[in-house]
Amino acid sequence: MAKDTKERILLAALEMFSQNGYAGANIRELAASLDMGKSSIYRHFESKEEIWNTLLDRMIAYYAERFGSADHLPPVPNSLEGLVEMTMRMVQFTVQDEKIIMTRKVLSIEQFRDDRARALASKHFLTGLTEIFAPVFAGMMEKGLLKRDDPTLLAFAYTAPISALIHLCDREPDKMEEALRQIEAFSRHFIKTYGSNQFP
């Protein structure tokens, strides 16, 4: 029961932080949103700062398990079409999972206030994607699917436009379908450009 209450607090805090930022959220309003007293919150967390850090820890693990990370890489595709399919699965997850959407909003807001949020924003919006796709591309080169090139530079070139379109989905949700079509078209253009001649 205590674990369930703790999870409810963290989910409500994530929603509040994503709407108001860290400074705009307070324990009294958080407790009220859960029909609790402040003392009930403090039985589980010593402070708003502890809620913040626990929430970031949880979301790092949640993202890595479901999307991937440098330590939890997706399997190397066995075909060029497999790269498109893998990319679209990952993108669909990141633009449709409410926890991930709220986490992205929190990091966007707090990256200018909090050092940890800044580092996580850089990792999740840019460097972490390169770290995931560089070994994937290296593996695809080993399989003869992609032309030999610098896999890290190729991963950066591949993920930066996709990341930009994901952020567009956050800012303008009504453009999501268009953005998803653009991402798939870009992925197909990429494999047409960088696919090995052995696999036209």
Image (cartoon, rainbow, N blue to C red):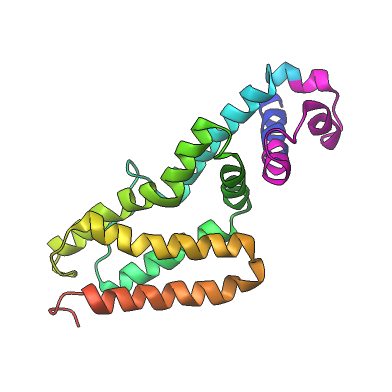
- 156 within the magenta span: no
Up/down of 37 relative to 181, above or below:
above
Q: Is residue 47 left or right of residue 82?
A: right
Q: Residue at x 45, y 47 (%)?
A: 124
In the rendered image, the quadrant that contains the N terminus is: top right
For residue 195, say whether it is visible: yes
Q: Is residue 175 left or right of residue 76?
A: right
Q: Is residue 11 left or right of residue 40?
A: left
Q: Residue at x 26, y 54 (%)?
A: 134
For residue 57, say whether it is visible: no
Stretch of the chain drawn in magenta: 13-41
Up/down of 79 relative to 62, above or below:
below
Q: Residue at x 74, y 18 (%)?
A: 42
Q: Residue at x 39, y 60 (%)?
A: 160
Instruction: Please state the horizontal and vertical placement of residue 63, each as a whole percent of the image.
Output: 48, 45
Instruction: Please state the horizontal and vertical placement of residue 177, each as a whole percent of the image.
Output: 58, 75
Along the line of sight, which residue is nearer the eye, 53 or 84?
53
Instruction: Please state the horizontal and vertical placement of residue 136, each as a whole percent of the image.
Output: 26, 57
